[in-house]
Image (cartoon, helix red, strand yellow):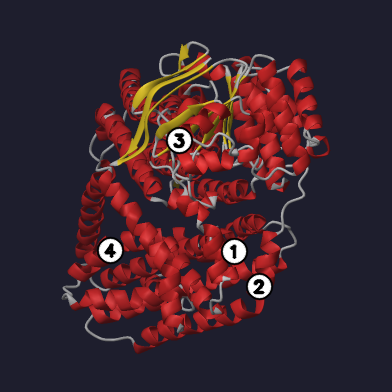
Amino acid sequence: MTVVRELALLLGPKWRTARRRGAGARGRGGRALLLLGVGAIAWPLVYVTLLRFLRAVRGVEDIGPLLAAKLLSLGLLIFLGILLLSNLIGALSSFFLSRDLPAIRAAPVDWLSTYLARLAETTASSSWMVVLLLVPVLAAYGRAYGAGPGFVAIAAAALVPFLVIPAAAGSALTLLLVRVFPARRSQDILGLVGLGAAAMIVLVLRVLRPERLADPESYRNLVDFLETLRGPSSPWLPSQWAADAMLGSLEGGTDPLGWALLWTTAAAAVTLGAILHVRLFPGCFTRAQEGSEGRAGDGRAWRALAALLAPLGVRRRELILKDVRAFFRDTTQWSQLILLAVLIVVYVYNIRVLPLRTGGGVTGYLVTLVLFLNLALTGFVLAAVAARFVFPAVSLEGRTLWLLRSSPAPASEVLGSKFWTGAVPLAGLALVLTTATNLVLEVPAGLMLLSLVSILLLSLAFTAQALAWGTFFPEFESENAAQIPTSLGGLLFMLGALAGLGIVLVAQGWALRDYLWSGLPGRTPRPPWPGEIGLALGATVVFTALTGLLPYRAAVRRFARLDRG
Amino acid sequence: MIELEGLCKRYGTFTAVDGITLRIRPGRIFGLLGPNGAGKTTTLRMLAGILEPDEGTVRIGGHDLAREPRRARALLGFVPDRPFVYDKLTGVELLRFAAGLHGMSGPEVEARIDELLELWELAPWRDHLVEAYSHGMRQKLILSSALVHRPRALVVDEPMVGLDPRSARILKDLLRAFADRGGTVVVSTHTLELAEVVCDELAVVDHGRVVAAGTLADLRTAARSEDAGLEEVFLRITRGAAERRIASLLGESA
């Protein structure tokens, strides 16, 4: 059998599974409709916003086209980072944890077919979301530059190697990590990945200093600023080559170097990956199968937590203890906390370096604006954290659901325990993050109260929503907890949570509109009145209660009917 | 003790369980037999409250499972056909969790857990994570989790899979002792030897329906094979000509 036929044979079941999932979604009606609805809102929103921005920016002489190009290369750089991390995690699943691997290893299949099939699977599962996000972005660029339908082919030709390079690199890196990592379990690699990604983010932040771009005055003169814009942000990375290749064609020319670099690097990455695979994979796969010898005693910390939870009653206590134990003993779960901690430090640092201080003090009106921006960004961080840690909670029960369903524990108690297990740390994180940034911003007491209550209620609403989406879109077949949030349900949760956040911010803005307008030029600035703060608080309570309670109640009803396990 | 009345379960156009009615008295071990895909596991999952029936009722100890789920489930211990449990808990933590789901904790539960772990020779593994357990050890741990809250009825799906001969013997003795103390046992199995030796009553399920029920003697009469063993009786009832051709088929291909 040729490699191509074997490849088709190996990918067939995956393709059919994906198609049947889609067919199942159509059968259930609501899912497909929801996806279409979300697509119908999100894509035009991104497209129209970016198109307006690009049209406005391109009109600015000299700087405009440079800014548009810089934006594309920075965007692709961010996507490249996401792709690399996502492929590292995805490769661990498809090359080492997948349940069909023993059967495929035992079959007389060529190693190259196995490698290419697994690489294709990793690329598809890790990249689909980035591709979906790129569609409106590239469409906006095409329209803004007046490109014809041929740009679709150009973009596809640039995106294929752009997606393959991180997939091949991520798969090879995972293979090497499995080989050298001293832990007995391959999942422990994710701890290392978390640390590596954390270090990378700190490095990028310190080296690039993106805040300087927003502050042209920090450059010696305009020429310096233009030089910074004109220079490639990352000349050695595929993101820059892809941006150069696409922008070249948009501007009516070609960038042969960008195209050559993209395709030769992709070919080289796949070839190198294949060489590594044939040499290392058999040994690495054997290592990955080794079981754990883990012992876990009834330590002092667990006894203390059990005592702390005692007032909740035996059932709730045991449900929470079980979830907390499973979380901290599963490296795929906690390793990303390292990344989270670094992100928080980076976030507070960014607030600190914002150019708000003029003459030693913080401008009052700017503080208010940044306060709302801070609330939006903290809300986004919280939604992302909830997607990663709360959304998979029901999916992770999967094969063990029988134990809960055959017990007298009602669905409300099971989901309630999961809610508090997620909500308490999330609310703690929210309060620490908001208090720290508010202290840096020297926010007045009334606004401090408003932002703290808002973020607390938002974190509770996000937890409830994450549980609800996770219950309606469970991923029982997932072999890797880190991959669950990248599912359709995870995407829908993020979009729903951000829409909820937007509603709360708009409601607060409406309640505080007179105060906000008082800070505009030509008006007399004044502090917010207690009534305005109260109205904003009331609106926040109503909207977070609605966006949290309704989906949560629906989820309890749904959980009682889940028939898996 | 356990009553199933007109139980139906449909998946789209396919009817997995088609109007099963059974009454199982306390102190009896009731065996559910049937070919693959006959609807045994679906029936047991509805009985354990994991699946909701499309039609029909389940009553456990007089409590309707749909109307009084907590009371009905509190009386039941369930062992599924596949031993999936929380890999990141230790054996003892899993049993404590299972007891906790029934609202039980404290010294009595701890003593019960020790007894069960000793019975199944799992005591040396009590503080090991379940992910390190073999298939058979997991099966024994799940059997323990079904017994930890002292249920009045046991529902066991394929109990012998993965058990070594010694553990299989312990299980048979345990089921008998459980029934002798007034408990009700419903067991689904393909191990006809278990059904023949342990079960007081049997039902043969095929295409989602009970095609024969009663004692082994009743089944022999129904199959018109008074002196035959359970295997022959089972094949006759389920029209198992295909199964009997397997030997010659293997002979041809070998």
Please provide percent x and percent y for residue B163. Answer: 70, 42
Regarding residue A423, the answer to whether it shows in the image is no
Regarding residue A491, the answer to whether it shows in the image is yes
Q: Nearer the viewer's eye, disc 2 or disc 3? A: 3
Which residue shows up at 53% across the image and 49% down it? A481
Query: Residue A241 versus residue A361: which sits nearer the camera?
Result: A241
Check if mark 1 and mark 3 are on a common chain.
no
Please provide percent x and percent y for residue B18. Answer: 35, 32
Up the image or down, B9 lies above or below A230; here it is: above
SS class, disc 3: strand
Which residue shows up at 81% across the image and 30% down it? B118
Q: How many numbered dots are placed on residues in this image?
A: 4
SS class, disc 1: helix
Q: Name the residue that disc number 2 marks.
A: A282
CA–CA distance between discs 2 and 1? 12 Å
Which residue shows up at 41% across the image and 43% down it? A380
CA–CA distance between discs 1 and 4? 37 Å
Q: Which mark is residue A135?
A: 4
Mark 2: amino acid: Pro
Q: Nearer the viewer's eye, disc 1 or disc 3? A: 3
Please provide percent x and percent y for residue A28. Answer: 28, 42
| Residue neighbourhood size for the residue with mark 1, other residues' Cα within 10 Å, grouped as few (<14), some (14–19), many (≥20) | few
Q: Name the residue that disc number 1 marks.
A: A102
Q: Which mark is residue B205?
A: 3
